[in-house]
Image (cartoon, grey):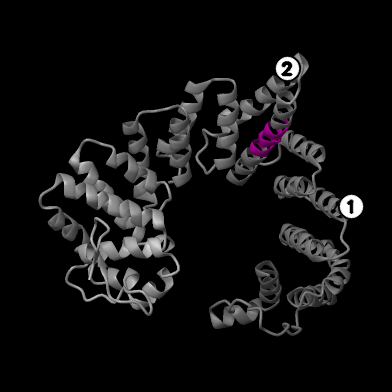
């Protein structure tokens, strides 16, 4: 809808230049709720008809009257006959985006309708050729036409018009998705190969062919800064299959630690999962998760991080584990998770065994939380909700006085007696 608003605004602004210059400022942006702009003294009949047509398309789309929108849309492309060359690219993009949006919602649209509009807009001008082709390929993929999508990507590969940043980025995207299709074909061949009783060398050769096609582009694409998660996973899977572990590790390391790439928690997750599959040392695994924690302290892998630290012989690692689990419980998504509360209890129990001043250590870690943690975890409302999970309630009750010793807490089961639980699990009335 924003595109339509900008178009309507531009049409009105172009007809009222004298008024704008007189006021010394531009007119405010046309909102969706504004009425249709009125006719101006400088507006031609052609501009008026296209403006009114666009307004009717907008209203029909806002009210989900897709048949009506499609009928008006059939006439709107006459705007391309406007002799103002500066406006033509803008009109083409409006037509492209409106047509595909209407087809997406129209109950009787067909794949042929999509193909017609995409081909028409691709050949109406060169500015948006690559992006329209990429969108066309996506639509074909969604409908299972993989070979047709490959043809679209192949046609884009030979496109040479344009030499700006947008063209370069679109080219990279097209190369990436073309390689991803080669990976999909490789997976199909791999599946066929694994279920074939008599191992056929021809299938292996085809797999190798698609691997070479995919890796040729992927190894170049992943050097370009960006978020390439599905492409990285595809490339690493193929490298692992052919036992090229060094290259796979280098790709993941570069993706995670190259400062030219945007911060991406998934990059560290993929590196950790790969190292875990390769039986890397606990120290190395913990190093990867340490960086992940700095990016996403509530990540589910923080449970594994705390587990690794608890297995360490260093007492400082147990201290770190305490902070990690408490950080997880700062987030509402972990509030009722039994595994996290049990891990917190295990950490404190280990501190009991190794530290004489363990209570002071726990209180120091909780010092910044004492004003709001009781309200987050230990109210009568939480007791009522947790009563459906007796094990969770037992673990939390055993920790409430350790974590919040100076706070009067009403964390008791609804209709039950006020009991506390020691860390050893014995009831204390």
Sort mark 1 into few (<14), some (14-19) or many (20+) by Cα contacts within 10 Å. few
Q: Which mark is residue 205?
A: 2
- The mark nearer the N terminus, 1 or 2, is 1
Q: Which picture quadrant has residue 23?
A: bottom right
- Looking at the rendered structure, the secondary structure element under dot 1 is helix
Q: Which picture quadrant has residue 146?
A: top right
The residue most toward the left is 356
- Is 187 displayed left or right of 242 in the figure? right
Q: Nearer the viewer, mark 1 or mark 2?
A: 2
Is residue 76 visible from the viewing direction of this image? Answer: yes
Q: Position of residue 248 (x, y in %)?
A: 51, 27
- From what the image shows, is residue 399 above or below residue 309? below
Is residue 264 visible from the viewing direction of this image? Answer: no
Q: Position of residue 415 (x, y in %)?
A: 37, 80
Q: Nearer the viewer, residue 187 or 138?
A: 187
178 falls in the magenta region: yes
Q: Which picture quadrant has residue 317?
A: top left
Location of the N terminus (image quadrant): bottom right
User: What distance separates the C-alpha of mark 1 from that of mark 2?
Assistant: 36 Å
Residue positioned 34% across, 57% down in the render:
341
Q: Nearer the viewer, residue 424 or 74?
A: 424
Sort mark 2 into few (<14), some (14-19) or many (20+) by Cα contacts within 10 Å. few
The residue most toward the top is 201
Number of callouts in the render? 2
Residue annotated with mark 1: 112
- From what the image shows, is residue 407 above or below residue 224? below
- Is 57 displayed left or right of 226 in the figure? right
Which contiguous range is marked in magenta? Answer: 175-185
31 falls in the magenta region: no
């Amino acid at each position: 809808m924003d595109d339509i608003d900008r178009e309507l605004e531009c049409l009105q602004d172009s007809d009222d230049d004298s008024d704008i210059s007189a006021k010394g400022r531009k007119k405010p942006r046309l909102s969706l709720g504004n009425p249709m702009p009125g006719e101006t003294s400088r507006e031609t009949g052609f501009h008026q008809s296209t403006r009114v047509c666009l307004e009717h398309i907008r209203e029909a789309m806002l009210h989900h009257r897709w048949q009506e929108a499609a009928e008006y849309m059939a006439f709107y492309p006459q705007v391309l006959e406007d002799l103002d060359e500066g406006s033509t690219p803008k009109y083409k993009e409006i037509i492209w985006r409106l047509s595909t949006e209407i087809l997406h919602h129209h109950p009787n649209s067909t794949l042929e309708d999509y193909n017609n509009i995409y081909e028409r807009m691709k050949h109406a001008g060169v500015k948006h050729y690559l992006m329209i082709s990429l969108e066309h390929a996506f639509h074909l993929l969604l409908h299972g036409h993989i070979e047709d999508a490959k043809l679209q990507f192949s046609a884009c590969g030979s496109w040479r018009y344009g030499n700006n940043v947008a063209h370069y980025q679109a080219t990279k995207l097209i190369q990436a998705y073309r390689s991803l299709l080669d990976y999909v074909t490789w997976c199909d061949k791999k599946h066929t190969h694994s279920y074939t009783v008599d191992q056929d060398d021809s299938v292996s050769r085809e797999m190798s062919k698609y691997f070479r096609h995919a890796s040729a582009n992927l190894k170049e694409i992943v050097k370009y800064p960006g978020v390439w998660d599905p492409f990285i996973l595809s490339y690493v899977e193929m490298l692992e299959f052919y036992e090229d572990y060094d290259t796979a590790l280098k790709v993941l390391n570069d993706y995670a630690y190259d400062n030219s790439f945007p911060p991406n928690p998934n990059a560290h997750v993929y590196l950790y999962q790969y190292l875990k599959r390769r039986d890397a040392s606990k120290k190395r695994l913990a190093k990867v998760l340490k960086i992940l924690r700095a990016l996403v302290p509530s990540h589910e892998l923080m449970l594994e991080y705390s587990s690794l630290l608890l297995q360490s012989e260093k007492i400082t690692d147990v201290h770190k584990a305490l902070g990690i689990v408490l950080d997880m419980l700062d987030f509402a998504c972990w509030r009722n998770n039994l595994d996290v509360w049990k891990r917190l209890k295990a950490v404190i129990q280990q501190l009991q065994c190794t530290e004489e001043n363990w209570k002071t250590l726990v209180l120091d870690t909780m010092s910044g939380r004492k004003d709001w943690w009781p309200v987050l975890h230990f109210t009568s409302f939480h007791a009522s909700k947790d009563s459906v999970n007796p094990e969770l309630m037992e673990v939390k009750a055993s920790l409430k006085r350790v974590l919040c010793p100076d706070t009067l807490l009403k964390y008791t089961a609804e209709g039950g007696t006020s009991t506390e639980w020691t860390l050893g699990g014995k009831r204390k009335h």
